[in-house]
Amino acid sequence: VRIAAAVVEAPGADPAVVHLDLRDPGPTEVLVRVRAAGVCHSDVAYARGDLEQGLPFPVVLGHETAGVVEAAGRGVRSLAVGDHVVVALTQHCGHCRMCELGTPMLCLHRRVPPGALSRDGEDVYAFAGGGFAEAALVDEASLVQVPKDVPFDVAAILGCAVATGLGAVRNIAQIQWGETAMVIGLGGVGLSAVLGAVVAGCSRVVAVDVDERRRAAALALGATDAVPPGEALGPVLEPGGFDQVIEAAGRVEAMQLAVAACRRGGTVTLVGLPHRDAVLTLPAADFVVSQRRLLGCVTGNVRPAVDLPDYVRLYQAGRLPLDSLVTSHLPLSDVSEAFRRCAAGEGVRTILTNP
Ligand SMILES: [Zn+2]
Ligand SMILES: [Zn+2]
């Protein structure tokens, strides 16, 4: 089928909507009519060329996608035409060593539908499905059905921001109720981590960001304190350090602050994606004798079929006010403006929509 899609031609180029060919689904693939796709900092970083080297261009970005099943391959067993789905960005196979260890984001044999998108016979890469388009081709393994009364914009952010922030709390940090927590960097991921710490029963959730509106958002979501980095931090720090610190800014200084603010024997979880050339340095002797744990975290180690339905149920029970993370909607044709808002840190999530 012929679809409109936002293509980034080369590193540093603005995304522009053009027409592409999307092939029919293979046996285990599903054609998803995209209704909503969130713009994440990783999309902006990919387009700028800030992520790892050698990523393919031209590319259709968009890894926070929700929509409706329009067609399914003959081997698809769990979904039917008309089902509402969220695209998990794992693209995992489900049966390699990493998948069976419960770490599908580390899958050794990703199922990226080959040659899904093309223009005049030339391949156009679809990153994690390529949600900045009218439709996307996704392997069944990366799709999770969501109830039809969940709004498409909320379903979309489950795919990255919510999965990453809540998963950092649930799957990586494994926060226990009563613990004290600090979250640094309050974008979609950081605010989701605040939500996770609140749901997990933390006795304190201290949220840190330079942006006053984001701090206000964190307080509205249940953070006990919200302060900018720097001098204002002093009065809200835990005297012996926090049990748990989650860094969601993707900046080396924020990571160093995270380690310094963590108690001896506590846990630091790094979830913000830094520039590919960034190097983290730490006082080595202090790190060793402090017995802190420093953990990396990609997409909250999301296990799509386990975590996403649980988050949907928490949302439906009124325990996860995810609607407040969606701060603006734009049609797909305004993709450049959506990228600008994301890069400028305006609002939390801008959602690109298709009618
Ligand atoms: Zn993302
Ligand atoms: Zn796998």
Image: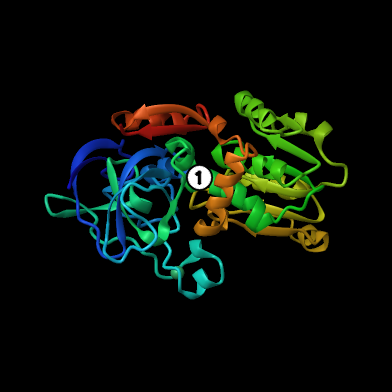
Name the residue: 54% across, 65% down. Answer: 103
Ligand 2, image quadrant it occupies:
bottom left
List the single residue furthest toward the right.
239
Q: Is residue 354 visible?
A: yes
Lateral position of residue 143 relative to residue 264, left or right: left
Farthest-out residue, bottom: 97
Q: Looking at the picture, how far across and down is residue 336, in whole percent?
A: 34, 31
Tell me where residue 295 sits by quadrant: bottom right
Q: At numbered mark 1, what does the secondary structure look like: helix, strand or loop? A: helix
Q: Nearer the viewer, residue 229 or 207?
A: 207
Which quadrant holds the C terminus?
Answer: top left
Residue ID for mark 1: 158
How many numbered marks, from 0 up? 1
For the question of whether residue 339 can be seen, the reply is no
Label 1, residues with CA under 10 Å away: few <14, some 14-19, many ≥20: many
Q: Is residue 251 above or below residue 212?
A: below
Measured as percent of width and height from the top left, residue 169 is found at 66, 51
What is the three-letter code of the residue carrying label 1? Leu
Q: Quadrant of residue 312?
A: top right
Quadrant position of residue 174: bottom right
Percent position of residue 180, x then y = 79, 45
Q: Is residue 93 left or right of residue 242?
A: left
User: At 28% across and 53% down in the image, what residue appears?
Assistant: 125
Q: Is mark 1 within 8 Å of ligand 1?
A: no
